[in-house]
Image (cartoon, grey):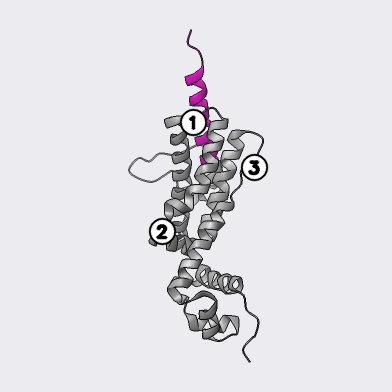
């Protein structure tokens, strides 16, 4: 028996879950109706046809990325928090983000995070081109890292054995650092790597600005 109560939000939630798990091609009106336990006509009544449904999912994804809020006691901490939140949001919904990109709304999707980064750049004393450089650098760091993570997941590399890391030909180079060899052969904590990179990036940019503002002797 078809269910009688159904909301637009429930339709969108279920559709988004299908896309996240199986990709956009898996989202058919018939499959969505089956997931919801309702008739296809009921879905049409709530969200229109499939293209309208995809447009609604894209709009919701853009809105979701607008909920990023900086956290921390200093501009540097808050900038890093925005970068972490943006990475997490992109990682959680790759197929939906791809749909946003396909519809030419990528810049709109990133706008809230950019605004938060601009605010923190100003709080750190950066203006004009220097502030823009920080915003772009952080954004590219996040997006680039997410792409590398996704590529590694699709085609995971087999790490070499510890003993093979530093004794390959033709150099024959050997390291006296067995702890380093073990660490490089171990599974990679991608979030930890991301934090090392983004913290170093932000610290370097803010330190450069501090040097530029320091009075010359």
CB atoms at circles 1 and 2 under 8 Å apart? no
The earlier-in-sequence mark between 3 and 2 is: 3
Looking at the rendered structure, which numbered label has been put on residue 205? Answer: 1
- Residue lying at 51% horizontally and 50% vertically, measured from the top left: 185
Q: Which residue is mark 2?
A: 101
Against 168, residue 43 (above or below) is: below
Residue 23 in sight here: no
- Closer to the eye: label 3 or 1: 3
The x and y percentages for residue 114 are 50, 44
* Residue ranking furthest to the bottom: 1
Report, in whole angstroms, how far the alpha carbon at label 3 lies from the one at label 1. Answer: 19 Å
Q: Residue at x 56, y 29 (%)?
A: 124
- Residue in the foreground of this view, choosing between 181 and 104: 104
User: Disc 3 marks which residue?
Assistant: 71
- Span colored in magenta: 196-217
Q: Who comes first in sequence, dot 1 or dot 2?
A: 2
């Amino acid at each position: 028996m078809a269910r009688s109560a159904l909301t637009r939000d429930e339709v969108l939630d279920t559709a988004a879950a299908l896309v996240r798990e199986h990709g956009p091609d898996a989202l058919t009106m018939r499959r969505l109706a089956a997931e919801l336990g309702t008739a296809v006509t009921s879905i049409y009544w709530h969200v229109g046809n499939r293209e309208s449904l995809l447009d609604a999912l894209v709009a919701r994804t853009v809105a979701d990325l607008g909920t990023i809020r900086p956290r921390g006691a200093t501009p540097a901490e808050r900038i890093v928090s925005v970068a972490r939140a943006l990475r997490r949001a992109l990682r959680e919904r790759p197929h939906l983000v791809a749909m946003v990109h396909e519809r030419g709304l990528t810049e709109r999707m990133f706008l809230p995070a950019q605004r938060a980064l601009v605010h923190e750049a100003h709080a750190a004393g950066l203006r004009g081109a220097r502030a823009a450089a920080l915003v772009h650098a952080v954004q590219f760091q996040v997006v680039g890292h997410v792409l590398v993570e996704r590529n590694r997941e699709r085609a995971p590399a087999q790490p070499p054995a510890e003993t093979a890391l530093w004794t390959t030909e033709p150099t024959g180079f050997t390291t006296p650092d067995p702890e380093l060899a073990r660490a490089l052969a171990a599974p990679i904590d991608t979030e930890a790597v991301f934090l090392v990179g983004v913290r170093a990036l932000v610290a370097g940019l803010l330190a450069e600005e501090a040097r530029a503002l320091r009075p010359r002797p």
